[in-house]
Image (tube, coloured by chain):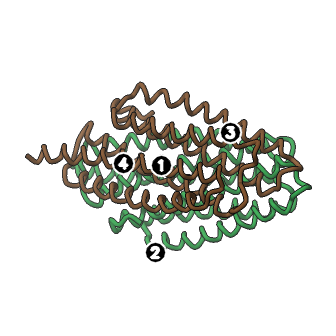
Chain colours: A green, B brown
Amino acid sequence: MARVHFQQDLDNLVAQVIETIKLVENSMSLATRALLDADQALAEKAIDTDAAIDGRCREIEGVLIELQMRQQPVASDLRLLLATQRILGDLERSGALAKNVAKQVRRRYPDHVVPERMRETVAEMGDTAVSLLNKAGLVFAEQDAALARELEADDDHMDTLHRALLQQVIAGTGTDPVATTVDLTLCGRYYERFADHAVAIARQVIYRSTGELA
Amino acid sequence: MARVHFQQDLDNLVAQVIETIKLVENSMSLATRALLDADQALAEKAIDTDAAIDGRCREIEGVLIELQMRQQPVASDLRLLLATQRILGDLERSGALAKNVAKQVRRRYPDHVVPERMRETVAEMGDTAVSLLNKAGLVFAEQDAALARELEADDDHMDTLHRALLQQVIAGTGTDPVATTVDLTLCGRYYERFADHAVAIARQVIYRSTGELA
């Protein structure tokens, strides 16, 4: 009976993580729309979501520690708990990065952060970021190690976009206000780090299924 | 006897973490000197150290998982292992941030990344970063929760320096090349994040001694 309960506890844990992943996706999606439309209301939503994400991560971490103390899991169950603990760290940081994007909107409102000529690149970085995390969520839900490896290629695409953005920033010499240069430089970094965290989440799944630290 | 061994294993683990903290401190220290003197040889050293840091973290993580599997620790021992796992993530990221600073030096060499008027602020950010991690190491070694709380104040000082640096970046409008604006914006962020990780390490010690997630 205790064993059945434990399996149920683990299933609940996985479900909670997947829900939190969706919340983070949604937050980055909101933040990007806020950024592209200089929409302060959306920005505030993304900023508020960060606290909700932290709260959930903290909650899941509590469950996780309690399970470890109470059940003394071994082998694959223990690996699931350890992988989940790392993933929570990635989700917290990802939520904070979405908040950072949104705070740029708040800071410059009603001005636009993104100059017209960079809109397309920023939009694509936003889409790529959310799609990477979405795939990482699938990888986690399905324990699909093959799909996990695919994410590395998607991350290369993000790096290409990031380099393109920095080129566009530098091309703005003498025309863009310095604040724009600063904002877009940081913004590019936020998306790039967000993608790195998605890759890290997927890697934990490889660890979970093989015991190899990727 | 097994119990004696386990305690010894834990002591070794703590010693290895402390050594790795010192390695990361040293790496950021090298990177900052490289940055201020446009010294490529020092920059390469910091870049190489990052791989060494990753290797050590991976090694410690292996030990940590093995201990958890083999010993099924409870309560405070389990909390030590969980805290250590989080700390390894912070150390890996901190090493990567030192490498990021060093890579700026490599990219601009033989030019200087930091304009004369920002040298002092950058030097102080470098010192503050290393001193924060050094304190975090002490906190970890001594399990000193009171000192852990002090780090939050030091981190506020880093935030003040970071804001000052961004002001100086913005004051350079029209005189600095855009590459300088981009580099210094990112550089400021690297130091600030490095400090955040030091605070996170110290917080794990509070968790370890109280079981409260800070």
Q: Chain of mark 4?
A: B
Earlier in the chain: of badge 3 and badge 1, it is: 1
Give the labeled residue for mark 2. Answer: A146
Earlier in the chain: of badge 4 and badge 3, it is: 4
Q: Quick one: quadrant of the C terminus of chain B?
A: top left
Q: Chain of mark 1?
A: B
Side of A144 where A192 appears, left or right: right
Q: Position of residue B101 (x, y in %)?
A: 61, 54
The structure residue drawn at horizontal position 42% and vertical position 54%, both measured from the top left corner, is A14
Q: Nearer the viewer, residue B162 or B180?
A: B180
Q: Which mark is residue B26?
A: 1
Q: Chain of mark 3?
A: B
Q: Are marks 3 and 1 on the same chain?
A: yes
- Kindly identify the amino acid type of the residue bearing the numbered disc 2: Ala
Q: Which mark is residue A144?
A: none
Give the labeled residue for mark 3. Answer: B121
In the depicted structure, whether residue A32 falls above or below residue A49: below
- Kindly identify the amino acid type of the residue bearing the numbered disc 3: Thr
Q: Which mark is residue B19?
A: 4
Q: Position of residue B154 (x, y in %)?
A: 55, 31
Q: Chain of mark 2?
A: A
Q: Position of residue B6 (x, y in %)?
A: 18, 46
